[in-house]
Image (cartoon, rainbow, N blue to C red):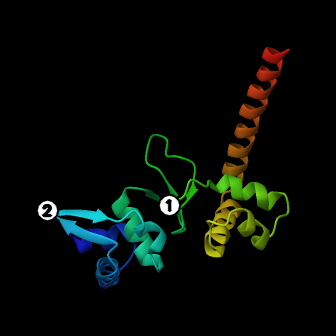
Amino acid sequence: MDFNTWASATDATVEEVEKAWADLQRRGLAEVKQGKVILSPLALRRATNHVQRRLTVHLSGYLFTENSFIVRLPGDPPSHPYVLNTRIAVEHIANYFREGWGLTDIQKDLSILTREEIEAAIQYYLNHREEIDNVIQRSRDVYETHSAHRELVAA
């Protein structure tokens, strides 16, 4: 385990990373087996602070964003931004927000998400509005293209 590399990758101090790692291990969310770091599938959701989230994201191979609740899957190009350890894209929460839904209403509809995760997704949207609006428009275009095609086939 290279705490210096992890600290550099997570924008934290070595001491913060060591403490985060120790807590993840103590809680059974991380371990080292045969020299390999093994994370529980629950580690991403059960990280209790910013440093733990950044560390579990790094060790899981996700790409960071400026918010520790929002990640991208690696690739060329990287995936659209998602809420950490879910399949819920920021664009979905942005749609709710654009339609005037409040945090409580969104949380009722997406009960898997915490208030912090919803706030993070909305903040990410506000910081990257043009990018997310383009993703939303592309999704609508695809939907309209395919729904029009289905109507022609059915007729």
Image quadrant occupied by the N terminus: bottom left
Q: Vertically, is 116 above or below 57?
A: below
Sequence-wise, the earlier of marks 2 and 1 is 2
Disc 2/disc 1 C-alpha distance (Å): 26 Å
In the rendered image, residue 135, in percent from the top left (x then y), is placed at 68, 44
In the rendered image, residue 126, in percent from the top left (x then y), is placed at 71, 63
Kindly identify which residue carries mark 2: 34
- Picture residue at 67% right of the left edge, 67% below the top: 111
Kindly identify which residue carries mark 1: 85
- Picture residue at 34% right of the left edge, 77% below the top: 24
For label 1, the SS is loop
- Residue type at mark 2 is Gln
Q: Vertically, is 71 above or below 150?
A: below
The answer to whether 141 appears left or right of 18 in the picture is right
- Picture residue at 13% right of the left edge, 62% below the top: 34
The answer to whether 45 appears left or right of 102 in the picture is left
In the rendered image, residue 64, in percent from the top left (x then y), is placed at 47, 61
- Residue type at mark 1 is Asn
